[in-house]
Image (spheres, rainbow, N blue to C red):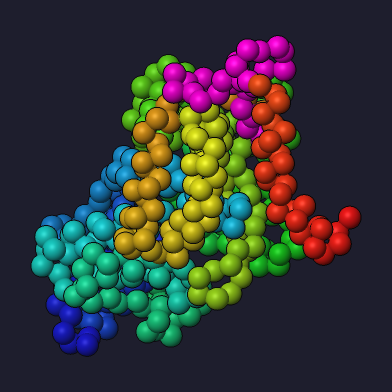
Amino acid sequence: MKKNIKKVVLAYSGGLDTSVILKWLQDEYGAEVITFTADVGQGEEVEPARAKAIACGIKPENIFVLDIQEEFVRDFVYPMFRANAIYEGEYLLGTSIARPLIAKKQIEIAKKMGADAVSHGATGKGNDQVRFELGYLGLNPDIKVIAPWREWDLNSREKLLDYAKKHGIDIDQKHLDKHGNPTTSPYSMDANLLHISYEGLHLENPMNEPEANMWLWTTDPTDAPDTPEYITISYKSGDPYKLNGDILSPATMLRTLNDYGNKHGIGRIDIVENRYVGMKARGCYETPGGTIMLKAHRAIESLCLDREEAHLKDELMPRYAKLIYNGFWYSSEREMLQKAIDETQKFVQGDVRLKLYKGSVQVVGRQSDMSLYSKDHSTFEADDVYDQKDAQGFIRLNALRLMIKGQKRGNK
């Protein structure tokens, strides 16, 4: 197979793993390598990846560095949040939702450049190998996939560092902290405009509290401002489009909400999740803007969705979230669910007022011209639209089967 690969498109960050992979592909496959570096808002410069690729002998015309932040939020994050998708009750799927877009771009570049293979840097233990490859094969069933971690014997960080040193590979990796300053971190990390994640080392013992200096984005809630801050998010067709009265693009909306969330220490979680490949994994996540956005979306839905519509949607959500977590973004069942979800969002519009304070997001007001809330019906004061006597028949009919069972089985 190695002899049959002529061109390969590598998802390339310029970090340790993909820098080693680039050299390894050249040595092991002898293929022409095309690098793709995606700017999904990870909070660090992506252009240095271009210089690193050139230093490794990649032709300038074979280097793609693309800003796909708007597409990421508009076509992936927003549809996911219309579903209120949360995996296992806590995880907002920040890593999971970026993979299908990166896979899509790799396939597009492969078609443009006449490449017959794609490659990624996901390990054989993680979910990302599944997400990338289901994306590749769902978009191009004939593409060949190279997964170095399932082929080579460089199965530890130490071996990767030795390989990099031996071949003169620059392995400097920096992320930005909450103040926008470059910083290094020993953790296995993934970042995009929606979130940042941390795994490994100290966190591999689920009993260890995360180190205070691990969190790069959010202020410690105990150090957050002592004064609450209020914001208003406006929705149209289920998507946020205004913040405090200003129309914002999807990426700008999420970026601005991240700023609010970071300031007030919002969006930290520490979980043990069930990976698709079988084992449990402990991870810590910061999803500041997404946490705010999800809270606001549920609030506006509470006004605009019919009861049974909302309940059925909530029943479908865990299945939808599981599909994304497991890499089935391009599956027929996800697309089917998305159409059903999007149908419910046609009348989800209006304003949500939120209070941000020391790690918490509280809904303190909501309004919509499509609201199904009727004060005339729900008031505790006298009204002339609801006959309270109607409740007796409703209760008796719903209790009928319970009464018959009690008579037959002796339940008193």
From where the camera sits, is residue 25 visible? Answer: yes
Quarter residue 121 falls in: bottom left
> Relative to residue 153, is residue 320 depicted above or below?
above
Quarter residue 78 falls in: top left
From where the camera sits, is residue 182 visible? Answer: no
> Relative to residue 107, is residue 232 depicted above or below?
above
Residue for point 63% across, 20% down: 386
> Relative to residue 9, is residue 373 depicted above or below?
above
Residue closest to the eye, 387 or 114: 387
Per the image, is 121 magenta?
no
Residue for point 45% across, 73% down: 123
Q: Position of residue 348 (x, y in %)?
A: 43, 31
Q: Give, as a single range, the part of the protein colored magenta.
A: 359-386
- Quadrant, the N terminus: bottom left
Residue closest to the eye, 293 or 157: 293
> Relative to residue 394, is residue 279 depicted above or below?
below
Q: Position of residue 176 (x, y in %)?
A: 49, 44
Per the image, is 376 magenta?
yes
On screen, residue 132 versus residue 387, left or right, reads: left
Residue for point 48% across, 80% down: 155
Q: Position of residue 362 (x, y in %)?
A: 64, 29
On screen, residue 181 versus residue 114, left or right, reads: right
Of all residues shown, which one is farthest toward the right?
Answer: 412
Quarter residue 264 falls in: top right
Residue for point 22% across, 73% down: 141
Q: Position of residue 49 (x, y in %)?
A: 31, 55
